[in-house]
Amino acid sequence: MTERVTILVFDGVTMLDVTGPGEVLHQAGRIGARHAYDVVLVSPGGGEVTTSSGLTLTGAMPAADADPVGTLVIAGGDRLAERPVEDELLAAADALAGRATRVASVCTGAFVLAALGLLDGRRATTHWRHVETLARRHPRVRVEPDALHVRDGRYLTSAGISAGIDLTLALVEDDHGADTAREIARELVVFMQRPGGQSQFSTAVTTPPPRSHVLRPLIAAVVADPAGEHTLPAMARAAAVSPRHLTRLFRNELHTTPARWVERARLDHARRLLLDGHGVTSAAHHSGLGSDETLRRAFARHLGTTPSEYRRRFATTRAPGAPGLTDPADGD
């Protein structure tokens, strides 16, 4: 028994957006899952497709001939975010999505679904570099900029490129259970499945360099010493401005409040501490978040997981049970 998975491709598609999900699905059949996947490449006109890297995909079926569709996966490519999606690709996606049992997008493939109105009122994500464009171009989509993959009804969207592997592992887990998905992940030497809410990048990486000479040293000070005194009054004193003016600068340049930015910077540091072997109590203390409960609330709010679960999934350089991976206070 096989299940059809249709991957929609086009000239300029990102190769890994296609081959990543394709290999996950291939491995499901190889390890003897209850049913294998019949993976079919489809393009608006069929035939050869030139990827963004210049390599060629051959044998794509014309979208009009694709039947059944099963699960539809729309691959991404930078051009989908850089200019309006062309009518031919939209028409192919619309016809396929209407016949699919579930619909997924990898990276900027979300722009195709959004342009069709299929994500209106729904939660969705895309590559971190294009989330602002997606939100601006399609204001009715509830864009989640800091998630690896998002499910809303029969629609699933994923972040950039390799996150398509995480999304496809999630699909396999839905179909065959966690053990099968885990075996595939082990075969591919990837994480079993990064939580959908796992942050794409850290606050320090994603924050653009502030234009203001007031914010630049403050941002550097928080990143260098997250556990320091970074209350609004303390930062305002250090910058020699009023708390109100500092708040205005954060909102205008970083689109958040000082307190929220500091919390994210501390959460990033706590994540690194956990992966370095610190327990929950130690990570909370040295990151500046203070208590175990504060750390757990921050993880739940921003990452949709717990500190222990995060460490279990990501601390891959240590063998299970190695020193430093347990903490008597780690009760989450």
Image (tube, rainbow, N blue to C red):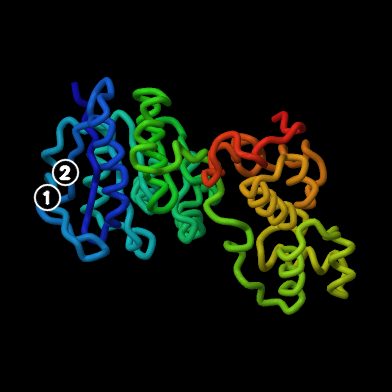
**Image quarter of the N terminus:** top left
* Percent coordinates x, y for residue 4 in the rendering: 21, 31
- 292 and 159: which is toward the camera: 292
x, y (%) of residue 279?
71, 41
| Amino acid type at image mark 2 | Ala
Q: Can you give x and y, in whole percent of width and height, for residue 5 in the image?
A: 24, 35
Q: Secondary structure at mark 1?
A: loop
Residue 122 location (% of width, % of height): 48, 39
Q: Are the residues at dot 2 and dot 1 in contact (C-beta closer than 8 Å)?
A: yes
Tell me which residue sits at (69%, 67%) in the image. Answer: 252
Specify whether 291 is left or right of 185. right
Q: Residue at x 34, y 42 (%)?
A: 188
**Relative depth, front residue between 235 and 93:** 235
Q: Quadrant of residue 41?
A: top left
- Quick check: 179 left or right of 304? left
Q: Residues within 10 Å of mark 2 (few under 14, many from 20)?
A: many
Label 2: which residue? 63
Judge whether 132 appears above or below 219 on screen.
above
Q: State left or right for residue 63 relative to residue 99.
A: left
Q: Which residue is mark 1?
A: 46
Quarter occupied by residue 98: top left
Quarter-wise, where is residue 29 in the image? Answer: top left
Label 2 to label 1, Cα distance in Å?
7 Å
Three-letter code, disc 1:
Gly
